[in-house]
Image (spheres, helix red, strand yellow):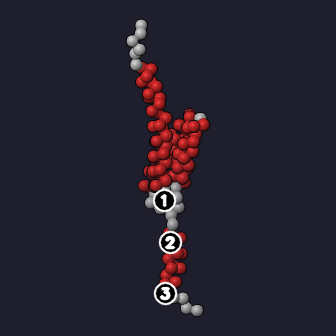
Amino acid sequence: MSESLDERGRKNLGEQSSLRQRPVSGMAMVSCALALASVPAILIFAPLGWVLALVAVIGSLSSRAALRDNPALRGARLSLAAFLIGAAVLVLQLIPMIIGFAILAVPTGMN
């Protein structure tokens, strides 16, 4: 009939922790999903991967600003991951373009 103090404390703690969980920012989740989708998209159709990565970076920056304004939301790590993955995809796609332009810009010495 009587529960021990330890069992009641655990039960109350479980109820309180589930009530205290904050919602995750939808923008952070979408940004992370787009960043993750941009990785295989580079291999399938490069411009699509570039667009997805760019949207992920913009969305992650927007969600980080929204998270700063609204402390009741979670998702700072998701938006950071989206930013890092999206930026990495953009950089990895820009490097071959820069190298290609550099090769084309070098004079051949033939007239």
Q: Of helix, strand and loop, which one carries label 3? A: helix
First along the sequence among labels 1 and 2:
2
**Farthest bottom residue?**
1
Three-letter residue code for mark 3 = Leu
Residue 92 against residue 28 in the figure, above or below: above
Residues at discs 1 and 2 in contact (Cβ within 8 Å): no
Look at mark 3 in the image and give the residue it sits on. Answer: 5
- Where residue 85 appears, as percent x and y from the top left, is 48, 45
Three-letter residue code for mark 2 = Ser
Q: CA distance from mark 1 to mark 2?
A: 15 Å
Please give the label number shown on residue 17: 2
Q: Residue at x 53, y 75 (%)?
A: 15
Any part of residue 27 in sight: no
Specify the quadrant that holds the C terminus. top left
Q: Residue at x 51, y 74 (%)?
A: 16
Look at mark 1 in the image and give the residue it sits on. Answer: 74
Q: Nearer the viewer, mark 2 or mark 3?
A: 3
Please give the label number shown on residue 54: none
Specify the quadrant that holds the N terminus. bottom right
